[in-house]
Amino acid sequence: MATPMHRLIARRQAEANKQHVRCQKCLEFGHWTYECTGKRKYLHRPSRTAELKKALKEKENRLLLLQQRSFLSLHVYQHRRNCRKEDQEKKV
């Protein structure tokens, strides 16, 4: 059976653990939601659709960037090749 001393120790441990607990209503630390006396805070969260659109847009931008890099590297390669041909023709 739990003696009064055990109950006191358990209560103190519960109070100590509360310091790390965040209330889901007011978003402050130190108490449980059912103990909250504060007002509910509005927390703006983007919709799932907005998050998916943003991720899709970022993915498209990365793909375009990669395509531009490969396109530029292809042009640089072709330019260098043409310059070498011109240099060889000048030597001959």
Image (cartoon, rainbow, N blue to C red):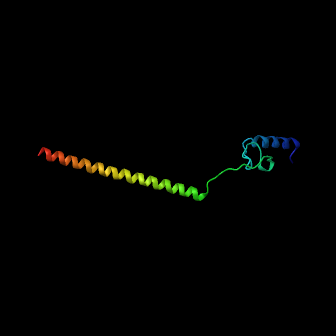
Is residue 46 or residue 27 the one in the foreground? Answer: 46
* Vertical arrangement, residue 30 with respect to residue 45, above or below: above
Q: Residue 40: percent from the left, percent from the top?
A: 75, 50
For residue 85, side relative to residue 11 (left or right): left
Name of the residue lying farthest toward the left: 92
> In this view of the protein, which residue sits in the foreground, 16 or 74?
74
Res 8 quadrant in image:
top right
The quadrant holding residue 53 is bottom right
Residue 60 percent coordinates (x, y)? 46, 56
On the image, the x and y values in percent for residue 85 come to 19, 49
Q: Judge left or right: residue 10 versus residue 56.
A: right
Say which residue appears at 52% left-offset and 55% top-offset: 55
In the image as oriented, which residue stretches furthest toward the right? 4
Above or below: residue 54 compared with residue 7: below
Please tell me which residue lies in front, 51 or 6.
Answer: 51
Q: Is residue 50 left or right of residue 36?
A: left
Residue drawn at 45 percent across, 52 percent down: 62
Number of marks: 0
Residue positioned most to the bottom: 49
Residue 92 x %, y %: 11, 46
Q: Residue at x 50, y 55 (%)?
A: 57
